[in-house]
Image (tube, rainbow, N blue to C red):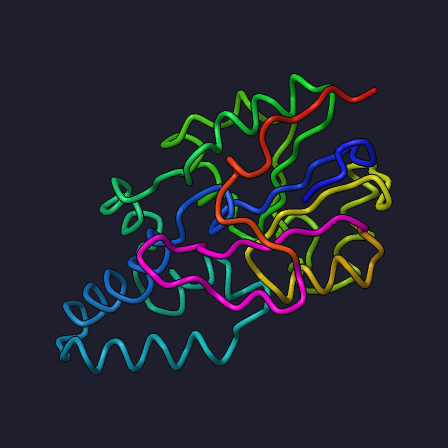
């Protein structure tokens, strides 16, 4: 599935790729509407409709991923609400083994996520994955989400990589298409970002059910 002889850098999404998207789906579809309903004294159904509508209006933009934006827009402490359900944060199977093997192979392994830096910090604290990584970046630091091809140009100035010798694993098809347009040669989607949901349609992209499918990782020659 992966021609490791061609790979020198491994770029990894976080939510839905390394981590089970069940946390984020539960948080935004259930927990945030619950607290929004309580604060505004409306029904849960009304709250779900309101939060969903606001979300759809900015989907795919940087604000869609921004904790500070949503805290202001919904007048809720989003980071504190994440802490309330942080027990749901979980890695996908074989993630730790995969990260360890990639680093041991001599390749560079980097998280590149649209998640806000506060979310990244929370999830790294909860999972303790940071020691297995060479670096971790948030798209907010570059002023564009990964869906924008220009993001990759800005990102490459900070984290030099050769697109022809780079593997990106991401559960977002729009992000994969953006990376493909930029010239990243090795792309993998994820069939089950959320373990509680059925497999997703990955279009024309090759995809994995889990990181165990990519093991073992041979040494970089």
Q: Is residue 89 left or right of residue 140?
A: left
- Reply yes or no: does residue 198 show up in magenta: yes
- In-front residue for pair 137/190: 190
- Across and down, in percent, residue 68 comes to 45, 56
Number of disc labels: 0
Judged by its main secondary structure, the magenta piece is: loop
- The segment highlighted magenta reads 185-205
**Most distant residue in the top direction:** 104
- In-front residue for pair 2/152: 2
Where is the N terminus found, in terms of image quarters?
top right
Seen at 76% across and 48% down, the residue is 186
Seen at 78% across and 60% down, the residue is 180
Seen at 81% across and 50% down, the residue is 185
- Reply yes or no: does residue 4 show up in magenta: no
Where is the C terminus found, in terms of image quarters?
top right
- Across and down, in percent, residue 202 comes to 57, 65
Seen at 55% across and 29% down, the residue is 98
- Image quadrant in which you'd find residue 46: bottom left
- Across and down, in percent, residue 189 comes to 60, 55
- Across and down, in percent, residue 184 comes to 80, 51
């Amino acid at each position: 599935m992966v021609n490791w002889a061609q790979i020198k850098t491994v770029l990894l999404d976080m939510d839905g790729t390394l981590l089970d998207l069940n946390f984020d789906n539960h948080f935004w579809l259930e927990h945030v509407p619950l607290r929004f309903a309580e604060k505004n004294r409306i029904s849960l159904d009304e709250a779900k409709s309101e939060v969903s509508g606001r979300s759809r209006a900015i989907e795919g933009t940087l604000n869609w991923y921004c904790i500070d934006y949503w805290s202001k827009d919904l007048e809720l402490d989003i980071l504190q609400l994440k802490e309330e359900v942080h027990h749901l944060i979980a890695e996908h199977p074989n993630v730790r083994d995969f990260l360890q093997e990639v680093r041991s192979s001599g390749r560079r392994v980097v998280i590149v996520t649209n998640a806000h830096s506060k979310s990244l910090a929370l999830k790294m604290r909860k999972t303790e994955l940071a020691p297995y990584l060479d670096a971790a970046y948030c798209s907010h630091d570059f002023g564009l989400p990964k869906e924008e091809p220009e993001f990759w140009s800005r990102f490459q100035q900070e984290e030099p990589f050769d697109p022809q010798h780079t593997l990106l694993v991401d559960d977002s098809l729009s992000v994969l298409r953006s990376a493909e347009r930029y010239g990243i040669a090795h792309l993998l989607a994820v069939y089950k970002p959320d373990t509680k949901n059925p497999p997703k349609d990955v279009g024309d992209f090759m995809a994995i059910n889990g990181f165990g499918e990519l093991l073992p990782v041979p040494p970089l020659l």
